[in-house]
Amino acid sequence: MAEGMIKRLGSMLENKEISCTELTNTYLSAIESANGDLNAYIKVTPEAALDTAKAVDEKLARGEQLAPLEGIPMTLKDNISTKGIETTCCSKILEGYKPIYDATVWAELKKSNAVLLGKTNMDEFAMGSSCETSCFGGASNPHDIGRVAGGSSGGVASAVGGNIAAYGLGSDTGGSIRQPASFCGIVGLKPTYGSVSRYGLIAYASSFDQIGPITTTVEDASIVYDAISGYDAMDSTSQGRRGEPTVKTLKNDIKGMKIGVADEYLDGVSDEVRSVFEKACEVYRSLGAEIVRFKLPSLRYALPVYYILACAEASSNLGRYDGIRYGYRTANYKDVNEMVCKTRSEGFGAEVKRRILLGTYVLSAGYYDAYYKKAQNLRGSIVKAFKDAFETCDVILAPTVPMTAFKKGNAISDPIETYLTDICTVPVNIAGLPGVSIPCGFDGEGMPIGMQLIGDTFCESTILNAAWQYENAAGAEVFKPSAYGVKL
């Protein structure tokens, strides 16, 4: 089983094997060495990181006990607001923007003296599946820098997979945590909608967006989820975590657990992904779980439903970027209308403009009923189909992505084709369910393959425990460390 970085580093700090300042400097040096290849970080924050490390060392010197994430070097996706630290969503239109407040998730981690190494790369406004729509250029896959890290949280996945952050927080609108985690051979948790506050997350599609952890192991994901989940009055959709901390429920026996496999999730996946997935099913059988095959026909509507609704919400959310109050403003204009038009034309990238146009179209008079309203009705059908499925199974097992990480440039040359990489992940966001992607093997070229466990709403403990059991049983066969980064 892969060793979790969080508990290992925490133990080293508590036992005074290394000071937090030394640990932080080790990570900062690794970033300086590896980031030229990985392009995971777009902004490194050494001063803030070392200030926090000093506070942790002083606490240790006083003999005080550390919280689980205290002193652990980590990173944030660049759409999570950080007070006084530039937050751009990797878009030219937010160039120079420094939030005046912290996102709730970062405020909670900051209180626990989490060491922020910097902000990481992403697809512009989280729109993309490869990280290549970033105005800073895409992040590289730590297992093959000629391939993409995935998107939109590609920078976080590249940093964690490349050992230049112990863990990170990303956001998942249609698979943006799970898909890059799968491509980079690590763990990514998309929590139940409402269990983690979205306050301070710069919005793409508000009814789909959810913040979650990207880590090296399931236990690490559980530790981070427990730290960031909870009710937040600043988020009108917040409900918080239900039940006891998920770390306490890991290692529970799964004998007799019913694991559902929907035939539709296997349509169109590559032969190598299917083969590795079927082997994972056998591992679960060996643990005493029952594999239940079933049909989920409404899944065929998931991709069009997602892109219609998400783009509609994006066209509304991104209307606030006009060059008047913050961020980029065009240099030459005659009046305010021309200024707004030229600012948005110059400031947004091609993929963002494509999605804004699509979203505006489906909301326009004459097309609202044909597209947006129909998609909303179908969303309700998909939600009900999952509810019915959980009447007969405890969790659903599916591939995370139909293929392994593709070569750089594919998403730019054929952006529509890359939308299909989301086909296995978007149903979870449509229904607001929790899903965790974990490594389950490799293709013939040694690139990681991931699978996801999907649970009913607020059943993070169930899917994380089932994921931990697989990770423990499969061991080193499904995990391959990157050649990059920190080696302790």
Image (cartoon, rainbow, N blue to C red):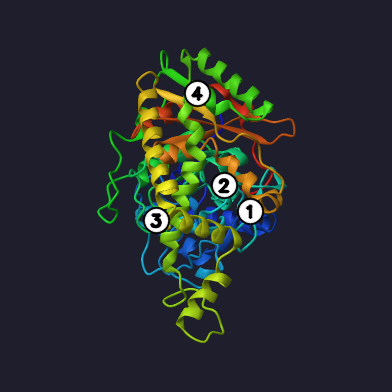
The residue where tag 4 is placed is 262
Q: Residue furthest front?
A: 366
Q: Nearer the viewer, residue 175 or 445?
A: 175
Element at badge 1? loop
Q: Position of residue 341 (x, y in %)?
A: 51, 74
Q: Kindly identify the amino acid type of the residue bearing the numbered disc 2.
A: Ala
Q: Can residue 116 be seen?
A: yes
- Sequence order check, earlier mark of 1 and 3: 3
**Which quadrant holds residue 456?**
top left
474 relative to 41, above or below:
above
Q: Kindly identify the amino acid type of the residue bearing the numbered disc 4.
A: Ala
Element at badge 3? helix
The residue where tag 2 is placed is 157
Q: Nearer the viewer, mark 4 or mark 3?
A: 4
- Sequence order check, earlier mark of 1 and 4: 1
How far separated are the C-alphas under marks 1 and 3?
23 Å
At a point 36% along the width and 45% down the height, the residue shown is 227
**Disc number at residue 106?**
3
Q: Kindly identify the amino acid type of the residue bearing the numbered disc 3.
A: Trp
**Which quadrant holds residue 256?**
top left
Q: Is residue 169 left or right of residue 348?
A: left
Q: Nearer the viewer, mark 2 or mark 4?
A: 4
Q: Position of residue 469 (x, y in %)?
A: 48, 23
